[in-house]
Image (tube, rainbow, N blue to C red):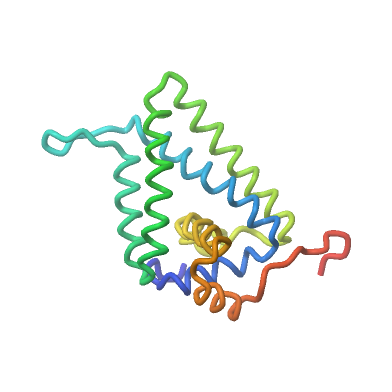
Amino acid sequence: MASLFRPALDLMAQYAAYHRDRRNIATHFVGIPLIVFAISTLLVPLSFSVGDTALNAALLLWALSSLWYLTRGHFSLGLATVVVNGGLTALAMLAGQGEHWLAIGLGSFVVGWVFQFVGHYYEGRKPAFVDDLVGLLVGPMFVVGEALFTLGWGSALLAEIEKRVGPTHLRDLAHPV
């Protein structure tokens, strides 16, 4: 496994190499948020206290991953990822305290991974985390980055990623390479 502490550009380019088919990227816009939400939902019941403050494992995971995103050398991308993951964690806090938290968490997790694997069918390539577990952390940053690129933000970052791994495309499923 390569270093966990590589810069955002290197992480994004490596992840993007496994995600050039636009249909795969589109499925990740559903799958990755569902998986982040699911993991947080499943971690909410694991609670503990620090002094007088009640916390849970979902908040701890969000805080630790936030530090990682903010220190990858691309602060605005890291901050946007922290905000999105924070929103998903906040929703999970609500779901994780309800009567059906386990069904919601497991259901979201399974559906999220179904979307991921459908996307990788279109891609014709295995998921990035199979070769580098850091890809599990990079996925949310990649989806946030792709959303921001679509909105016109980060053109220099996008250009450098595409310089390294090429532009997105639609893989011809009838005549795969």
Residue 46 spot, x, y in % from top left? 32, 33
Task: Tell how many labels.
Answer: 0
Q: Is residue 50 left or right of residue 104?
A: left
Q: Is residue 9 above or below residue 117?
A: below
88 relative position to 60: left or right: right
- Measuring 41% from the left and 39% from the top, which residue is drawn there? 40
Vertical placement of residue 55 versus 84, above or below:
above
Q: Is residue 171 left or right of residue 36?
A: right
Q: Residue at x 33, y 62 (%)?
A: 70
Q: Residue furthest bottom?
A: 163
**Looking at this rendering, what residue extends furthest in the left direction?**
51
- Please determine whether, in this image, residue 147 is positioned above or below residue 116: below
Extreme-top residue of the structure:
99
Residue at 40 percent of width and 72 percent of height: 6
Which one is in front, 80 or 93? Answer: 80
Identify the residue at horizontal 60%, vertical 76% (top origin): 162
In the image, residue 93 lies at what x, y percent? 37, 33
* Horizontal side, residue 22 vs residue 39: left or right: right
- Give percent across and percent down for residue 36: 47, 45
Residue 49 percent across, percent down from the top left: 18, 35
Image vertical order of residue 85 relative to residue 105, above or below: below
